[in-house]
Image (cartoon, rainbow, N blue to C red):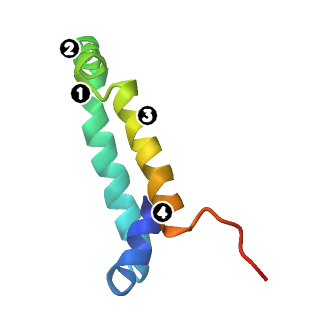
Amino acid sequence: MITGLCDNYPNLLRRHREIFVAILIIFIYLCALPTTTFGGNYLITLLDTHGTALSVLFVVFIETIAICWFYGKCQPQQL
């Protein structure tokens, strides 16, 4: 994720990569912090119950393969 964002916005993020990574890590830490409280068990159960199902992930994987096949990115390079 960090490399992809730095590649998309090179003028902004490559110069300040350390600051960007620090902000991202702090954000992820703050998002995960509620799972460590007494109500964290309920939050994890809620995320597990209503999160992305395995079938949705399978459909996205098949769509990715279809797009790669359509645009020819999965074919080996010809010399």
Q: Are marks 1 and 2 in contact (CB under 8 Å)?
A: yes
Whichever of labels 2 and 3 marks the residue nearer the N terminus, that label is 2
Residue type, label 1:
Pro
Q: Which residue is mark 3?
A: 58
Which residue lies at the image location 33% right of the left edge and 41% below the top edge?
29
Question: x, y percentage for residue 13?
Answer: 36, 77
Which residue shows up at 34% across the image and 32% down it?
56
Residue 14 in the image: state x and y as whole percent: 43, 80
- State which mark lies toward you, 2 or 3: 3
Cα–Cα gap, marks 3 and 4:
18 Å
The secondary element bearing badge 3 is classed as helix
Please state which of the two labelled residues, at mark 3 or mark 1, is closer to the viewer: 3
Front in this rendered view, residue 17 or 7: 7
Residue that badge 1 annotates: 34
Q: Earlier in the sequence, mark 3 or mark 1?
A: 1
Q: Would you name the residue on which mark 4 appears?
A: 70
